[in-house]
Structures are given as C-alpha cells and as structure tokens.
Image (cartoon, rainbow, N blue to C red):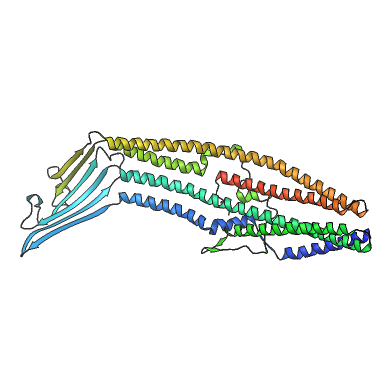
Amino acid sequence: MIRYFSITFLFITTLSFSQEQTQVQDTLILSFSEYLGYVKKFHPITKQAELTIQIGQANLMKARGGFDPKVEVDHNRKKFKNTEYYDQLNATFKIPTWYGIELKGNFEQNQGDFLNPEAFVPDDGLYSAGISASLGQGLFINKRMADLKKAKFFREQTLADREILINQILYDASLAYFNWLQAYTEVKTYTRFLNNSRIRAEGVQRSLEAGDKAQIDVTEANITVKNRALGLEQSKVKLMKAALELSTFLWLNDNIPVEIQDNVIPELDIESTVDKVLEISGLPLTDFVVENHPKLKSLNMKYEGLQVDKRLKANKLLPIIDLQYNFLTQDPDIIRSFNSNTYKGGFNIAFPLFLRKERGDLKLAKFKLQDLKFDIDNERINILNKVVAIYRELESFEIQNQLIDEIVSDYTTMLKAEERKFSFGESSIFLINSREKSLIDSQLKAISLQNKYLKTKAKLFNSLARDLENL
C-alpha cells in the first residue's frame, strides 16, 4: 500500500509540473531593465525633471535680456488753433555692456513756436554719440550682471536637481518592482507546497480506505491543506497590491497609464543583473567622491548664487557716481564733426549718510551664506556616512544570503529524509508537515532576505544619486 501511495505521489507531481510548464509558456516576463526604461522615458515625474532644465535655460535667457540693445523713440506734439506749439522727436539707441558702462547714440529734432530754448536744434536735427558710466555703485557688479551670473549658477543647479529627481523616481520604482517580485515568489512557494499537501492528503485518504491509516491522519492532512490554501490566498492579495503599486510607475507616451496584467511576471534571476541595470557594479567605496554627488553640486551652485548676492549688497555701500558724456553734431556722416568742443554731459552723485539699510542687507546676505555652509557641511557628512553604511550592509547581506541558502538546503534534506522514512513506515504525516513547515518558513525568510538585499542595492543607487545612462 505504501508503494501504491508513492507511485500516486510521483504521478500527481509529474502532472502538476506539466501544467506549470504550460502556464509558463503563456506568461510574459517584464524584465527589471525594461521596466525602468519605461519609467525613465514616460513617467510624468521624469518629464517634470526635464522641465527643470528648460526652466534654467529660460531664466538664463531672461537674464541675458538685460544686455540686449534697446531702441527708444519719444515723440511729443502739441497743436492748438492752427498754432504748432511744439513737435519734439527723440530717438535713442543704447547698448549695455558687461561693466557699468552703456554706449548710446541719439537723434533729436524739435520745432514749434513755443519751444523751450534749450530744445532748439538745427532744422535737420542734432545727432549725438556718447557713453554713460557708473563709477561707484554698478561699476564692477550691478543688478543685470548679478542676475546673469545667478542664472548661470541656477542652470547648473537645475542639472543636478534633475539627476536627483530622476534618481528618486527610479529608486521608488525599483522598490515597487522588488516588492512585486517578492509577492510573486511567495505565491509560487505557497502554490508548490499547497500541491504537495494535497498530494499527501489524497494519499492518506487512499491509505484510510485501504485500512492502513486512521481518520485522525486524514483530518491532520486536510488541516495542512487548508493552512497552505490560506497562506496562498493571503499571498495572492499581497501580489495584487504589489502589482497595483507597480502599475503606478508604468506609463506610455501621451501620459497613458498602464496596468499590469495577470500573465505578466517579474524577472526571477534578478540578482545577476541588478548591479548592471542600476549601474553600481564596479564601484568600490574607495572610488566614491562625495563632492561629485548631485545634492552637493546643487547646494554649491546655490552657495555661489548667494555669493553673487553678497557682492551686490556690498556694492551698495559705495556712493552712486553716474557720469555721461555725448559728442554732438549735425553732420554724423563726417567723422571729424565729432569734437570735444560740442558736447552734452553731466554727473549725478548720491550717498546715504548712515547706510543702515545697505549694511543690514549685507549682514543678512552673510548670514544666509553661513547658514547654507552649515547645510553643505552637514549634507556632506550625511551622504558619506550613508554610503559607507550601505556598503557595509551589502557585505553583511552576502554572508546572510549564504547562510539562508544553507539553511534552506538543510531543511530540504531533512524533509526528503522524513519522506523517505515515511515510505518505509517509520514516520508520520505530522512529522512530514512539521519538516515542511520549517522549510516553508526558511524559504519565505530567504525570499524576504532577497528583497532586503535588492532594496539595499537600490538604496546604494539612491545614495549615489546616479542617473541611468544606459536605459
């Protein structure tokens, strides 16, 4: 009768394996690399990250606009009761330069019966060409110079911020994939052991009918089947939630969300490819340069922008000294007509007596720099310690994985030995179920440990704030 039970066990196992093979042929594997490729290309957050670069470029363009040449035309005319009081035209072309100097060309033409005497010009108009300069405030730095410098730093900052944003969404997506893999593997584990418990229950039932087993053995076998079925249902719910979480990261072009179908499964042999996909292979701790971290780059660019602000505030302590000088001529085609005997010029000087506003602004700018410097120093240590801790954690996981593999192998050996003893009538269903429960627990622990190991690799990827260039 025991031989009959063993043959039945082998037949049912073979049939179950054949059904699994048929199911595998109908499934589609969503590899980790392919999945992250979709996330990086189509996820709204990655597109939002690209906008930060465009915002930086737009700010730079806006700041460069402060140095655009300008054409200004001012025309005023008054006519009343057939009397032309005045008709004044003033056209100016200005070219701002880097330092506080502005080149200017002007054409002025005025006529009328009631002109101010200082507005009298030749009938064909009066031309002028000259320069205006700030010799105090605005000579070495002014607002348009500061805006342009800050815009350049901001553009570099947006590049670093983009890397951080994309890295974070890829990290979150990786965690979702690893959770999906864990849930799928647990479902497979429970399914396999549920089939085993059903086979044993059927064998015990046949033994009962043959008079070799008691009813209590059948009850015990059925309890095991129900426990395995309960574990399977719980793992299926977990898999459903993990698949939905994964779907939140999957999008197609034109912002179309994608939902994972039941026949799509994760990549099972992921440990051999995860380092390559996350581009963390061949990166020893000794090669890590904390100053190249995008977070520090972003903070350093912000610091440089505040340095420009401080220089601008310090420049406000200088007096305002604005000079202008313009050559005048009515014959602009003749170069020698521009001479120092005909000119229009002037200057403007202003200087606050106490400079309380200016000195207060400068102190605030220095405090902002000091505050940010503290943040940079703190962030540098945090990043370095975090990366070192993750490298140490990965080294520990290598040992843990080896140990759990050995534990699973030992429990498998014990279960097989118990089944062999049972085939000789020297064991019981209770002992087999006990051995199998220990094996299930160890395999679930191995699956959980694999999940933690993969997540730690993702944490390393996140701590390094790397962008995936090969996707």
User: Where residue 256 sits in the image (x, y, percent)?
Assistant: 54, 64
The answer to whether residue 280 is left or right of residue 203 is: left
- Check the image and report above or below for 236 versus 320: below
Residue at the front extreme of this rendering:
216
Does residue 179 show up? yes
Of the 4 image quadrants, the one containing the C terminus is bottom right
Q: Residue shown at 29%/45% (left/top)?
A: 97
Does residue 317 show up? no
Nearest the eye: 202 or 49: 202
The answer to whether residue 345 is left or right of residue 267 is: left
Nearest the eye: 53 or 179: 179
- Check the image and report above or below for 2 versus 384: below
Q: Residue shown at 36%/38% (left/top)?
A: 365
Of the 4 image quadrants, the one containing the N terminus is bottom right
User: Where residue 208 sits in the image (x, y, percent)?
Assistant: 90, 61
The answer to whether residue 377 is left or right of residue 18 is: left
The answer to whether residue 202 is left or right of residue 338 is: right
User: Where residue 442 sits in the image (x, y, percent)?
Assistant: 76, 48
User: Where residue 382 sits in the image (x, y, percent)?
Assistant: 54, 38
